[in-house]
Structure formats: C-alpha cells, structure tokens
Amino acid sequence: MPPAPKPKAPIWAAIAETLRAEIAAGHYAPGTKLPTEAALAARFGVNRHTVRHGLAHLAEAGLVHARRGSGVFVAGGSTDYPLGRRVRFHQNLAASGRTPSRQISRLETRRADAAEAEALALQPGAEVHVVEGLSLADGVPIAAFRSVFPAARFPGLIAILRETSSITTALKAAGVADYTRASTRLTAKSASATLALQLQLSQGAPILRSVGVNVDAAGAPVEYGKTWFAGDRVTLTVAPEE
Amino acid sequence: MPPAPKPKAPIWAAIAETLRAEIAAGHYAPGTKLPTEAALAARFGVNRHTVRHGLAHLAEAGLVHARRGSGVFVAGGSTDYPLGRRVRFHQNLAASGRTPSRQISRLETRRADAAEAEALALQPGAEVHVVEGLSLADGVPIAAFRSVFPAARFPGLIAILRETSSITTALKAAGVADYTRASTRLTAKSASATLALQLQLSQGAPILRSVGVNVDAAGAPVEYGKTWFAGDRVTLTVAPEE
DNA sequence: AGGTACTATACAACTAGACAAATCATTACC
DNA sequence: GGTAATGATTTGTCTAGTTGTATAGTACCT
C-alpha cells in the first residue's frame, strides 16, 4: 500500500501561516497589537496553548514580539545606519526613506562616575547631565542611547532638551555650532533584561554597543555617549571620510 | 544545543539591581530623592507596579525608603543629629528628609531621687513627672530617652503628653515658650539587655549616652533628660552656637 | 507501550487604570 | 507677614486583563 505523502499539518502551523499571511497582507501594521491569545483561541476554536505554539513560531522567525501583560505586537524590518565622523540620526534615516523619531525616557543631572568623568575630562564627582532614550524608525525601536554632558559647560541643556529632543539642535542652542566624533568603540553584547524590554527584543538577543566621545571644533569633549543597537534591526556601515 | 543558561530573572529584579548599582556608583547620594516611580517606569519602559516591586525589594534590604507623597530616598549612611543649645528631634530629622516619630512607653508621676532632685534644683523627695520612650527615624529606633520634669511647676503635663507625645509642644502648652540646653554630658557605653531590646540592637552594641538639663528663658531648670543613642545609627554633630 | 498533538486548569509575572492618602508649592486672605 | 486654602505631585492600594509557565489529562497514531 503506497503510504500517502503525509503533509502532516499541525493545527498550530496552520494558525501561524494564517497570521503570517494576514500580517503580510497588511491587516496588522508593524507595531500594532494582535488580538489576545484568548481571542485568537476563540476565533480558531482551539486551546490557548495551540495558539501560543503558533505565535512562538512567528516570534522565533522575528515576525512578532510578545510582551507579558501587554500583548503580542508585529515587528518591523532592518535599517541601514552609516557610522561616520558625523553621526546624525535623523538625517541618516530620513535619507533612506524611513521616519525617524526619538523618545527620551530619562533626563536628569547627577554626579559623574569615574568613567564618565575621565571621558569628559572632568574632575571625579563633577555634575553631568544624563539623557537616555530610544531611537525609532517607523515607530520600531532601533537603538537605545545614553548621552552624558558636562553640566558646568551647558547649564540650561536639560531645559532645552525637554522641548527639542534633538541633541544636535540642543547643542547648537548651547553654543556648539558643530561637533565631530573623536573616538568610537564597538562591541558585541547580549541584551540584558531591561535593554531587551526597551528594544522589544527577547532577552539575550544580539546587541551592538557603541561607545564614543564627541568633541567641539576646539577639541574639547562635549558629549560622552553609549548606544545599544538592536543587532537584527540595523546594519552599521562605515561611511567614507568626508 | 544552543546555549540556554537563562536563569529566571524577573524584570523587577533587574531594575532593582540597576538601581542598586547606580546608588553604589554614587549617582544618587544618601539622603537624595530618587526619580519618581512614574519617571523610573518610563525610563525602564515598564509599568509603575513593576518598579514598585523592585523598590520594595531595595527598601526591604534597607537601601532606600519611601515616603508617601514625597518620594523615595536612598537610606545609606547614619542619621546626623545636631547637638546644639536647642535640640529639637522632629525638626532635625524632618530637615534631612526622614520621617521622625516618637513612641512613649511609660508615663508616671513619682518622687525624685537624689540625682534628679539636684539636677532640677528641687528638694529631695519632691514629685516629678517621668516620661520614657523611643525616638524613631523612618520606623527605625534611633534613641531611647527618659525625661524628668518638676511636677509642682507642670501639674497637667502628663495629660498633655498623653496626646501630643511631643515634648516641645507639651512644654509650650504648660507655659514654657522656649527652652535651651544648659549642660550636656556624653559617655560611651555598652547596650544592656533591656536597652538592646528596645533599640533592636544586639546586646553589647555601642551606645552613646547623653545626660542634659534644659532650662527656660529665666534659667530655671524645666527638664532633666537622659538619652541613649544607638551608636551605629547616629553621628552626633556639635552645632554652632546661635 | 510509547510518542505526539492538543485540551484543561491553575498560578505567576506584568500591564493598565483608577482612586485614596500624604506631601509640597503656590496663592489668597486677613 | 504669617496663615489658611488650594491644587498639583507622589506614593499606597485595589481591581481587572494579558502573557508565561507548569502540571495533568485525553485522543490518536505507529
């Protein structure tokens, strides 16, 4: 008896395929929330675990991303990110046809630790402004950043950043017309719990960390910044020297 | 088999660890207010309840303490206790962002012993009011005290203290608008069994005993008090003369 | 008999929102 | 000038909804 070719199609695979098709068809835009697992289970007439199996498959393929307590969200694609002497986030992304945006999640003044003081050529314990946030492309988080500025040199920087959220224009308003990147160091890391949360990744996902110092025209350090890129959403490209 | 050494790490634990590291790094000095729970929630991209869980963990470890309506403060270090001509417990502590409170454990009227009669310039055997209790900061016992007042001069003092538990306002209600410290003697001792119990210390812990007399504007003694400070929870500072 | 796919249930962890209670800063008032 | 009143801010508490994980059971297939 000829054994029929078993197309063994588990239910969860069919569900995953259906959802994948609906996402591809634009039923669910990137960044939006899928129906709850319970709702999907009711819709397909199966148990919640079966839906979960299918969703886990999609999550492993990077198509969706689940947040406990919140829901399952549709993920986005990958972006090019030129790394040159002048790193200007908005200009870079706008040039490649995506909509850049920034979310500032932290804005405070505190004492510098040893590494920050050394990078900015400050005395230990000097005050610094700290700006932390996310860089998004089309609403999808691309990178998390933390910038540290010497507070003595830019007294009103916090107030300015509270409105513009653009570092370039904030520094310009503070009297720094132009600045360039003096040094950059790149490392591959693994996403910590909090970082994975912010970047909407799973814990342990690959991360590209960039540590750099920006200096003004006179060579004095004005910013000490760290950036954590979501490894599978950006490809850093080394731009030619201008 | 991919490396799967992902031990369960709840988000709140990661947040608590981050904050603990920042406190240890000196970003938030002892006595300083942390960002609000809402700000921390925004910074970590997490719900406020999750931050609260982490903060509760730090509070349980004694690293921070929260005051409703005010904020969360880093607790490290010992309490400063200025020792000047005017010792006002509540005002001293409230000024440094801690929550002071008093527990009165004993309230009686009896005849003075020799030392009390001499300190208050009374005849041997005269009646005195005796108040015993604990002084707390953020619920932690800081000191035990015993105050002795001349009963003849303040007949209704016991009734007043039964409600206010503040010696300053009780004396004010009894007609003493202001009083200053005439003499103070300090000794280092070792905690007795009963004292260790009251102050929640181990027996034999270091104790600072202060014996002093407060006088009114006319120079007449109004209070003879002994205070036993928990040596490792306070640092007495000699305040400048006003 | 054993394995695979799915069901059923229960609980833990996190989110979301609302309201209460304490505190703080400002304003109005006398 | 001091004091009461007010409104905004901040922590505390509660209820409800959603995903993550664990355990146990059932049906079906080889």
Image: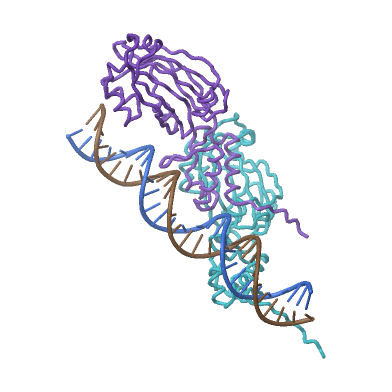
Chain colours: A cyan, B purple, C blue, D brown
Q: Classify residue A146 as left or right of residue A13.
A: left
State whether residue B139 appears in this view: yes
Decide: is B20 above or below B165: below
Along the line of sight, which residue is nearer the eye, A212 or B125? B125
- Could you tell me residue A107's position as x and y percent? 51, 43
How many marks on residues? 0
Q: Quadrant of residue A111?
A: top right
Decide: is A168 above or below B221: below
Decide: is A83 above or below C1: above
Along the line of sight, which residue is nearer the eye, B27 or A46? A46
- Could you tell me residue B98's position as x and y percent? 45, 33
Along the line of sight, which residue is nearer the eye, A54 or B188? B188
Q: Residue furthest right?
A: A1
Q: Classify residue B41 as left or right of residue B105.
A: right
Q: Which residue lies furthest to the bottom in this view?
A: A1
State whether residue A92 appears in this view: no
Residue occupying the point 54% across, 32% down: B76
- Could you tell me residue B3's position as x and y percent? 75, 56
Looking at the figure, which quarter contains the N terminus of chain A?
A: bottom right
Along the line of sight, which residue is nearer the eye, B34 or B105? B105
- Could you tell me residue A18's position as x and y percent? 61, 76
Residue occupying the point 28% across, 16% down: B152
